[in-house]
Amino acid sequence: MGNRGFTLVELLVALAVGTIILLAMSGVYVFTTRAAIDNNSQAYLQRQAALIIEEMARQIRPATQLAIAVCSGVANSLQVTEADGTVYCYRRDSAASGTGLIKNTTLPGQPTDSWDLLSGAPVTLTTVNGPTVDGAGNCGTTAGFCPGLTGSAPVISNGGKSATVTFRLRYRFPETQQFQQMTFTTDISRRN
């Protein structure tokens, strides 16, 4: 080669090889970025589910009675009654789409207080069919939240029974129309 420089063919070959390498690197970058976003959204959904489950467990463990009931006009709600008469009710919101997970608290002699367990989070409930509301493993049209009880009676009390809760959370990726969904099922036993 010496002092004469590069030929046009050598430059075109080098440019083609460089382009192929850059395309491969950009493909790896896009793949790893998407995988990281997917992993982060799954971790976020798992943290949200853990918070919801822990909140429910806080009331279910000391409960004296568990029931599947109508709460605030919403069927297939989980009603938890404690020894002091406090009633907690977990239900989807009453909107047709039912994307919120509401906790109603009724203290004896007090008005009902409601709180959305998903408030402030970029997470919503989405439709799920879960365990034993009607004995056949069906939640019907319950959107996103499906409670059930162990045993066959619709109301179980003083028996050390547990609540089985299935819910599906959906996370929308920022600035896109793509979603990550995960379904969670847990059994929470009463201690009484």
Image (cartoon, grey):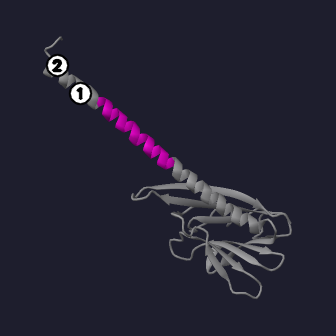
Residue for point 42% across, 56% down: 178
Query: In the picture provided, is 51 more to the left or to the right than 153?
Result: left
**Image quarter for residue 98?**
bottom right
* Residue closer to the observer: 10 or 82: 10
Total of numbered circles in the picture?
Answer: 2
Q: Secondary structure at mark 1?
A: helix
| In the image, farthest residue toward the bottom | 109
Residue for point 78% across, 68% down: 153
**Image quarter for residue 90?**
bottom right
Query: In the picture provided, is 121 more to the left or to the right than 151?
Result: left
Is any atom of residue 64 visible in this view?
yes
Residue for point 61% across, 77% down: 74
Question: Circle 2 sits on which residue?
Answer: 6
Q: Which residues are magenta?
A: 20-38
Crowdedness near tag 2: few (<14), some (14–19) or many (≥20) residues, C-alpha within 10 Å: few
Question: Circle 1 sits on which residue?
Answer: 16
State the CA–CA distance, disc 1 to disc 2: 15 Å
Query: In the picture provided, is 153 more to the left or to the right than 168?
Result: right
* Residue closer to the observer: 186 or 175: 175
Residue 87, percent across and down?
A: 74, 77
Query: In the picture provided, is 187 more to the left or to the right than 128?
Result: right
Q: Amino acid at mark 2?
A: Phe
**Image quarter for residue 23?**
top left
Q: Nearer the viewer, mark 1 or mark 2?
A: 2
Check the picture and name the quadrant holding the C terminus: bottom right
Q: Secondary structure at mark 2?
A: loop
